[in-house]
Amino acid sequence: MDASLLNIQPTTSEPIYRQIVEQLRRLIAGGQLEHGELLPSVRDVAGFHAINPMTVSRAYGIAESEGLVERLRGKGMAVIAMRKAEQSESHRLALLEPQLQALARHANELELPAAPVLRRLTKLLGE
Amino acid sequence: MNAMLRETESAIAPLAVSGLVHCYEGSNALNGIDLALEPGSVLGLIGRNGAGKSTLIRAMLGLLEPLAGEARLFGEPALQLSDAAKARIAYVPQQPEALAWLTAQQMLDFVGRFYPRWDKAFVTNTLERWQIKPNKLLAKLSPGERQRVDLIRALASQPELLVLDEPAAALDPVARRELLREVALRAGESGTTVLFSTHIVSDLERVASEVAFLHQGKLLMRCSVDETKERYARLWLPARMSAAAPTQSLSRRRHDDGSLSLVVERDARGAWPEAASLAGARVDALGLEDLFVEVAE
């Protein structure tokens, strides 16, 4: 994996370390990162994005404690990929939770009833 | 070797000030400032123009004598700093003026002799990358070029404490990113302690581990950049609910329609004030810049 694959937005209200963890979760869940693939070193990520190396270490530490990656001595962090079938549906759904909550909030603000929103969403999902 | 040295010295803050007071012709520039920097931390100092950032930095470094209070660098009083301590510190003022009769190269060669860890290769490479003609007189350089030369001077000395006053003002986006990268990597890998003032908040969000707001002569809040983003938010209440506003808030603004914007803080259990859960109330996460604007207005 290359450091440029991460997309860092320093000005948003989401701390950078969380942006990194979130993206790792997605890239791994989505299969873009395969089992055993090495993450870029802390230095590479910090250097490429001009961010504090401690922020990157913190993100990697969290990813490790979540079981997304493992520390290989002398090599760095390697992806532990779960095959999609092995991931529970609830686990994958949890990754969508922030977007679903935002959608629900917008719909409420627009005072839209659930039915038309769900109809449209169903259509978008291609059912 | 260096790591060992630093280990034994880790108890001594590279920079610490207590009770700093200073004023200019009646207006209070600094109104009792306490601040200490952990080794290896990167502190971003934000404040509006005229908030006293440069005054604070100069007082911290012993370049001006405050009316009251004390500044210490590596444990020594800032006003009577030993040569050994001076060699560990690099400072880049907003408008460097010293040694203007020399060329960039002459100045860098001259100054380099005073620093035991001077990185000559860094000087050559960076002068070229930042497109500065080494043989031009400093006095003939633009203010931006002048500041770039001074940044090179500061970084080449491989300081343990690096203090930058509005370093980004004179740099184009590419050079600025490069400077930030340099600052971030040095802090992370060599344990350089960095203090920089800026009003470009996004720079600070990239590399700073901590942030301090200087407002009306006081430090308003000081915490880690991540924590700041997670701990504070803007609570908006419509006019009919403004009576429910929490009494404790960092800032409070009433809009023309009677609605209220407050900057609120999570409590010890991580919950927002009660008013946030009322129907019609809105809680918006705040980026640092928004937070700064809300608090400094």
Image: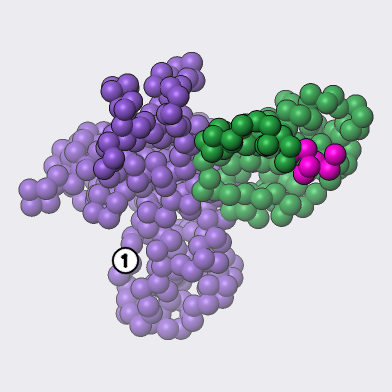
Q: Which residues are magenta?
A: A121-127
The image quadrant that residue A27 belongs to is top right
> What residue sits 84% from the left and 43% below the top?
A126
Q: Along the horizontal axis of the image, is B77 left or right of B211?
A: left
User: Does the segment drawn in magenta span residue A125?
Assistant: yes
Residue kind at label 1, given as amino acid type: Gln
Q: Is residue A123 above or below residue B272?
A: below
Is residue A26 or residue B252 the one in the foreground? B252
The magenta stretch spans residue B243: no
Residue B165 screen position, x and y as percent: 36, 56
For residue B26, say whether it is visible.
Answer: yes
Q: Is residue B190 visible?
A: no
Residue A50: x, y in percent?
A: 59, 53
**Residue, x 77% and y 44% (percent of image)?**
A124
Q: Position of residue B158 (x, y in %)?
A: 50, 54
Chain ID at mark 1 = B
Residue B15 occupies which quadrant of the picture?
Answer: top left
Question: Few, some or many C-alpha atoms within 10 Å of disc 1 (few <14, some 14-19, many ≥20)?
Answer: some
Check disc 1 and report the residue beneath it: B95
The chain assigned the colour green in the figure is A
Quadrant (top left/top right/bottom left/bottom right) for the N terminus of chain B: top right
User: Chain B's colour?
Assistant: purple
